[in-house]
Amino acid sequence: MIAEIGHYALALALGVSVIQALVPFWGVVRQDRALASVGSSAALTSFGLVALSFLALVASYVRSDFSVANVVANSHSTQPLIFKFTSVWGNHEGSMLLWVLILTLFGALVALSRNSLPPRLRAGALAVQGLVAVAFLAFVLFTSNPFQRLSPAPAEGQDLNPILQDLGLAIHPPLLYIGYVGFSITYAFAVAALIDGRIDAMWARAVRPWTLLAWIFLTLGIAMGSYWAYYELGWGGWWFWDPVENASFMPWLAGTALIHSTVVMEKRDSLKVWTILLAILTFSLSLLGTFIVRSGVLTSVHSFASDPARGVFILLILVFFVGGSLTLFAWRAPLLRQGGLFAPISRESALVVNNVFLATACATVFVGTLYPLVLELLTGAKISVGAPFYNATFVPVMVPLLLILPIGQSLAWKRGDLLGAAQRNAAAFGLALLAALALIAFTQGGPVLAPLGIGLGLFLVLSAVFDLGERIVTRASGWRAVLSRAKGLPRSAWGTAFAHAGVGLSIIGIAAAAWSSEAIAVLKPGERLTSGRYTVVLESVTPRTGPNFRAEVARFQLFFGGRELESIEASKRIYTARGMPTTEAGIRTHGLSQAYVSLGEAQDGGVAVRLYDKPLILLIWIGALVMALGGGLSLTDRRFRLAAPRRAAPVAAQAQPAE
Amino acid sequence: MSVAQPAKPLSAKPLPAKRRMTRKQHRLILIAAAGAVLFFAAGLVLFAMRDSIVFFYGPTEIVQKGVAPGTRMRLGGLVETGSVQRGPDQRVSFGVTDGTSSVTVSYKGLLPDLFREGQGVVTEGVFEGAGRFRADSVLAKHDENYMPREVADALKKQGHWEPGGAYAPPAAKP
């Protein structure tokens, strides 16, 4: 019964979304306020219904209802409760339901948001959002129904893919989807603005918090996915330039460009047409990502068994929304009022440069990801594009951007002083260069690019810190004055500094990977293996039984230059339901570095052991957290919080003549 | 705060002739700069396409296409049953077959968890000629039911693909 309720609620949600997509449009056309405001209640209802449907699926999983085919294929009665719960989205059908849940959640949030959206814009955005929901609800209902019953019901499920039986699954997909799907709001606002034919700084202010929110979650989602892959897969890698990873990285790059271009639009009423295009492209890339991941058209090390027929459906959705919005853009964008001019040396110009580079970087990833597909369609040849390609294209595009970032950050709006900005960053640059040179001298014969990368990262961190320092510390003022200045500084300035410093921290972590080292040996108890600065001694290998797996657990003593650290455990698990092995790496965090041990097969009376020294690797993810924190700080800026009461009156007045 | 207020749109006033020139010049500079970056990136992409892309071949294709020894490539197929031989120092060799031809792969390192005889595998490395391949990576997959698409295609080409057969996901256990 529960599954049927879920199925029924989902079908109802489809109907409500059709109303949400059509009626507000009609209301806007007929200038009927009552009709236009139907969108809000429809969005809330639709969210309620999808939430009910999602809860029904959760209940089926938690109760291990093996008469539901989806539960049978992805759950097992012996799974711990948390994994029964996360199994809900550990499969295609359930994860698409989560996708739709988040989509309708964002629709509901827009409906509830008290900020001063012009009513026509709100109605239009909710209608577009409703249209996206219609497409994906139809996709779930017609090709990926998670509530399909199975008769006769088996007594036991087939268990979730063991690789997914991890806390990472609880965190990574929801974060990533909130990011992915969050950009649908920006898309909806962009399309609504195109239909309306009006766009101004107000639009940017209304859209910016949504963009920031999506970007924060996408940042966290990608970082979490990367860390999960790093510890779960047991081979120490954290980024593979794999199509599925690129699928999440492209919207991130476009979204990063978007949060910068909306600033220009908000402050200078400029870059409007480009920002609209970018908003459309960002969500288009999210849709493309969904298509890549869900259709399996591109071979990925992350691929799970997939059904090409679903790919065709998503391809149709993709073509409709991307093609439709771009056609609308080509038709309506010339009608938008031109924005203001700006001087070549100014904050806004620097942000344009940022956008040019980020868009280009995104394009290189796009080419690398889709070129194999195009080539195969044209010639039948199969190729793979891996890290060497991106190192030769993406990296050279990003490095100049990052080098000029601190200068752009300290340029003033309207008319900047290039020399002054360069001087303000001279100290940071000098210190970073000094550190890089010292590192090169210190690690003679080692990789040269790595110290330069660390220098670049340090430059970003230092310049962000110095920039903040300059704004809050003045000569002849006590700490009290500093504190009050720090409080007075807009949150968005803090956000900028944190986000940019976060990029720097990540780059330091990435560059330091050049010094990581790996060693493999077959060890018997008492034998040792050294890699880089770490040495492990195998103490024992003991069997252990988990709720739904058996494990061989190897215990190691860990030494760092003669000093003993806390011991470390790595294991090899066999999940009994599928008979599938997984490797559980043993990781010991030591400062910002990690010692990483993973096991291979047992052989010759010993066990194959792989030991990595991963210097400063934590900085990669700490950097991402700091970036997200920066985004969060920007999101709490005064102007987003105070915008509503201050602007409510004039908007209502503006709306009157429209009737 | 003055920054928080939206800037006055400059274009609200009719622009004097001098400003209009600036707009045109301004746009030209912008387009030129963006063009330069794109051009630079396109150059990088084309250059990288030549050097850093590897082709995928099945064992039969290596023979048919006459792949030259020393070529870096990806090889995919099924791990031949009974062909896995382990040597000292984590050296391992195994046959990769598409049912018609097979290639002997040598590899040093730990094999991924889901590496099994009779199952699909994709390896990357250098073709050494005479049916020998030196792999530097054996790609892991995340799902035991997943057959790399290239491998499936290579098997299909040789007519050894059985949908719903040995390589398809197991049916629900009663």
Image (tube, coloured by chain):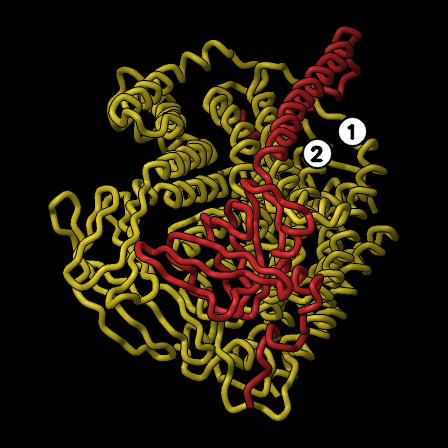
Left or right side of A291 for A638: left
Residue under the point 30% across and 23% down: A440
Q: Which chain is red?
A: B
Q: Colour of chain A?
A: yellow
Q: Nearer the viewer, residue B118 or A185?
A: B118
Asked which quadrant contains residue B44, the reply is top right
The residue positioned 41% from the left and 66% from the top of the image is A166
> Which SS class for mark 1?
loop
Of helix, strand and loop, which one carries label 2? loop
Chain letter for mark 1: A
Which residue is drawn at the image coordinates 16% and 52% (left, top)? A565
Q: Amino acid at mark 1?
A: Arg
Label 2 is placed on what type of residue?
Answer: Asp
Hey, which quadrant is residue B37 in on the image? top right
| Category of crowding for the residue at label 1, using alpha-carbon neighbours closer than 10 angstroms: few (below 14), some (14–19), many (at least 20) | some
Q: Nearer the viewer, residue B127 or A573?
A: B127
Alpha-carbon span between mark 2 and mark 1: 9 Å
Residue receiving disc 2: A200
x, y percentage for residue A511?
39, 34
Q: Are marks 2 and 1 on the same chain?
A: yes
